[in-house]
């Protein structure tokens, strides 16, 4: 038993505290486990301690505590186990056959990293400044709707973890928590992702409320105009007898009005959230009412990036909605260079889709991204373990990113340059 000599294991009170702190142990479970041990039996305590700490041995293992995860992917099986199939299916699925969802991540394998040696990397600084605000890390949290489907503490748990780790956060229009509560939990303003309702009065009210809560940026998502074919979602939730009846009761208007950002708003005229008729005129109209920064999320071509510059957009998020927009088979990391080239340093370019490793992050930064966003990984942590799960996901990605920064010899984000990657 490697840890038998660990002083903590000879102290029963510490062991009980350790168990109680574990997000997977209820008070009853702690009492049962501790009661079943021979009092003072160091070896039994050590064994239980080791079982809880044992890292995931194989890909696909269901971990019992955040500490057991070796990488962020280790949280997905635990999330799957924790969630009803319909909610897991909602999180996991893309569109059509999920090929774009998979391609986003797989594309990173085609990009190699060129490392420099003999640089003193004992001290590095991973902070980035966007719109005058400095974040400890270039890893931001993408907007993900309805996080109450993953954990009762929803976006609040995510915001608390982001506060501790210093990650920037974007709240979805259809989040389960209001922007005021998320801002308080994050301890700083968050960006607000806007779905363009087809009732301008409602849209305007959402923008005003977000800005009143301090949101420095309104992120208009533009990649859901044509609708989507959620075939894999239907397959994943097919056996779920609960089948989200409560979540979707009462039809679209009722569903929207239950989201806190629509409190006190008359949504009777809202028939869709995705701006099916939206054009660049809509961006101009929004530009006029947004007092802070206006960001477009979902741009994947240089043509649209050029157009965005003409319409006074302040930043772009290269995104295909995590493979949930269209089955384009175009990984966002492959779309990034043409957008970066078109923008030519005039505004920040962020990117999301398939980021699972610190090495993925450095590749995007080397290819010109200002920051990256992650979606599903922090939701796996949330679903499996609540706030400690999100914190662990963020810590693992940051640890991996720190390591690769040192390995390439970059002391600060500005030291990450295009020559650090080799593509093709
Ligand atoms: C369950 C789920 C809900 C999402 N909800 C939104 C949303 O409300 N607004 C939005 O702009 N993007 C939404 N997205 C897309 C994410 O913001 C992001 O683009 C994507 O998750 C990044 O890919 P990744 O999950 O591979 O990291 C959602 C993604 C998922 C998985
Ligand atoms: C369907 C929307 C309400 C949320 C979204 O953007 C998504 O699920 O990808």
Image: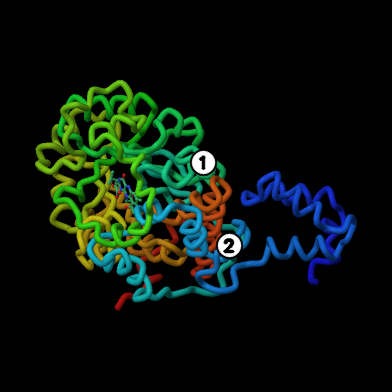
- Residue at the limit of the structure toward the front, as seen here: 241
Q: CA distance from mark 2 to mark 1?
A: 20 Å
* Mark 2 vs 1: CB contact within 8 A: no
Question: In the image shown, does 36 or 401 lie closer to the viewer?
Answer: 36
Of labels 2 and 1, earlier in sequence is: 2
Q: Position of residue 392 (x, y in %)?
A: 56, 54
> Does residue 198 appear in the picture of this structure?
yes
- Residue at the limit of the structure toward the top, as seen here: 264
Report whether 21 appears left or right of 310: right
Report whether 18 appears left or right of 109: right
Q: Residue at 18% of width from left, 29% of height from top? A: 288
Q: Position of residue 233 (x, y in %)?
A: 30, 58
> Does residue 411 appear in the picture of this structure?
no
Q: Looking at the figure, which quarter contains the N terminus?
A: bottom right
Question: In the image shown, does 413 or 290 lie closer to the viewer?
Answer: 290
Position above or below: 51 against 287: below
Q: Residue at 18% of width from left, 24% of height from top? A: 201
Report whether 67 appears left or right of 179: right
Q: Position of residue 108 (x, y in %)?
A: 36, 70
Q: Residue at 38% of width from left, 60% of height from top? A: 365
Q: Which residue is mark 1?
A: 157
Q: Which residue is mark 2?
A: 63
Which secondary structure, mark 2?
loop
Q: Position of residue 138 (x, y in %)?
A: 44, 52
Question: In the image shown, does 264 or 307 lie closer to the viewer?
Answer: 264
Which secondary structure, mark 1?
helix
Q: Looking at the figure, which quarter contains the C terminus?
A: bottom left
In front: mark 2 or mark 1?
2
Q: Disc 1, ligand 1: is the CB inside 8 Å?
A: no
């Amino acid at each position: 038993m490697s840890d038998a000599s660990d002083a903590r294991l000879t102290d029963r009170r510490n062991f009980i505290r350790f168990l109680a702190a574990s997000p997977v142990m209820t008070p009853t479970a702690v009492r049962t486990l501790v009661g079943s041990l021979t009092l003072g039996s160091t070896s039994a305590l050590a064994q239980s301690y080791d079982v809880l700490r044992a890292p995931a041995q194989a890909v696909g293992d269901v971990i019992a505590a955040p500490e057991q995860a070796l990488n962020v992917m280790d949280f997905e099986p635990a999330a799957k186990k924790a969630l009803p199939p319909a909610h897991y299916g909602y999180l996991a699925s893309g569109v059509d056959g999920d090929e774009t969802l998979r391609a986003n991540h797989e594309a990173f394998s085609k990009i190699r990293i060129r490392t420099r040696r003999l640089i003193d990397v004992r001290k590095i600084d991973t902070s980035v400044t966007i719109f005058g605000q400095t974040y400890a890390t270039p890893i931001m949290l993408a907007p993900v709707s309805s996080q109450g489907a993953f954990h009762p503490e929803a976006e609040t748990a995510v915001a608390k973890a982001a506060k501790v780790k210093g990650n920037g956060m974007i709240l979805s229009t259809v989040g389960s928590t209001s922007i005021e509560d998320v801002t308080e939990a994050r301890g700083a303003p968050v960006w607000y992702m806007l779905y363009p309702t087809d009732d301008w009065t409602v849209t305007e009210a959402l923008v005003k409320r977000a800005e009143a809560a301090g949101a420095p940026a309104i992120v208009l998502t533009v990649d859901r105009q044509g609708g989507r074919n959620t075939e894999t979602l239907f397959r994943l939730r097919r056996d779920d007898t609960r089948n989200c009846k409560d979540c979707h009761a009462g039809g679209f208007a009722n569903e929207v009005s239950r989201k806190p950002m629509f409190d006190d708003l008359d949504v009777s005229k809202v028939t869709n959230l995705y701006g099916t008729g939206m054009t660049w005129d809509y961006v101009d109209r929004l530009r006029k009412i947004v007092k802070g920064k206006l960001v477009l999320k979902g741009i994947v071509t240089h043509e649209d990036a050029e157009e965005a510059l003409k319409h006074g957009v302040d930043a772009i998020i290269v995104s295909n909605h995590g493979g949930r927009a269209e089955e384009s088979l175009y990984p966002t990391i492959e779309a990034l260079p043409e957008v970066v080239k078109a923008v030519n340093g005039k505004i920040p370019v962020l990117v999301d889709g398939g980021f699972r490793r610190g090495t993925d992050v450095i590749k995007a930064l080397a290819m010109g991204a200002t920051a990256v966003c992650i979606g599903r990984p922090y939701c796996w942590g949330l679903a499996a373990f609540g706030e400690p799960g999100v914190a662990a996901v963020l810590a693992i990605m940051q640890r991996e990113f720190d390591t690769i920064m040192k390995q390439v010899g970059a002391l600060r984000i500005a030291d990450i340059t295009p020559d650090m990657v080799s593509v093709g």
